[in-house]
Amino acid sequence: MKSQMRHAAMIVSLLSVSSCALAQVPNRCPSLAFYGNAATSGLCKSLSPATQNLQVCELTAAQPDVHLTFGLQPNGVNPPVPLHLTVRTQANNCEQATNIVQNAAGAFVAQSNALLCGVDPVTYVQRMNAQTIVPGSNGQSACRTAFINAQTGGKLTPAVAQGYLNACNTGGLANAACP
């Protein structure tokens, strides 16, 4: 009996370790393609450099501070950070967030629709879903095309665009290039 319990515990432990390992290599391509297209359209007021631990898309230029964040690379301690919407307000010193996932149809969905610091996340998720995702062109992937368009349109500096173009080359599952 003890042997069977130890065996069951070992299997659960191995499954937990393997699912953690799988979870640490997410497909970052949908977030990357969204960021590039949102930068081009102006939905993202600014993008942080891709060389930072976290990639930030500012959705507001004033209070409340509303932004999207995800992490491309582990920072040596933590695995990549999933896409999430954060709201910060100075007036009541509030900071709250909800993860953003894609449903089976490919639409963005907030994992929680509860108000974040008094702000309705559904409004921002609707804006995300209204964002046009441009297909690839001129032999470039959709991910790369989005950032090329953002740079050409003057929405990103060449250095910021290049960082994201490089990320498009390794943002997929198992570090494959994004489509």
Image (cartoon, helix red, strand yellow):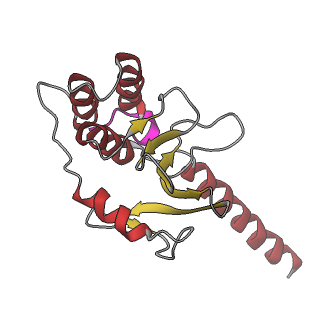
Magenta residues span 172-179
Residue at 35%, 42% (x, y): give it.
35
Q: Is residue 71 magenta?
A: no
The one nearer the camera, 46 or 83, is 46
Check the image and name the residue furthest to the top.
158
Badge count: 0
Where 46 sits versus 86, above or below?
Answer: above
Q: Is residue 178 magenta?
A: yes
Where 29 sits versus 1, above or below?
Answer: above
Residue at 88%, 78% (x, y): give it.
2
Most common secondary structure along the magenta stretch: loop
The one nearer the camera, 5 or 131, is 131
Residue at 41%, 23% (x, y): give it.
160
Task: Return the x and y of residue 173 as percentages of the image width and height.
Answer: 42, 42
Task: Return the x and y of residue 156 as percentages of the image width and height.
Answer: 33, 26
Residue at 57%, 44% (x, y): give it.
80
Where 16 sits versus 26, above or below?
Answer: below
Asked whether residue 108 appears in the rendered view, the answer is no
Asked whether residue 31 appears in the rendered view, the answer is yes
Task: Return the x and y of residue 69 as percentages of the image width and height.
Answer: 50, 47
The one nearer the camera, 179 or 11, is 179
The one nearer the camera, 22 or 27, is 27
Check the image and name the residue furthest to the left.
138
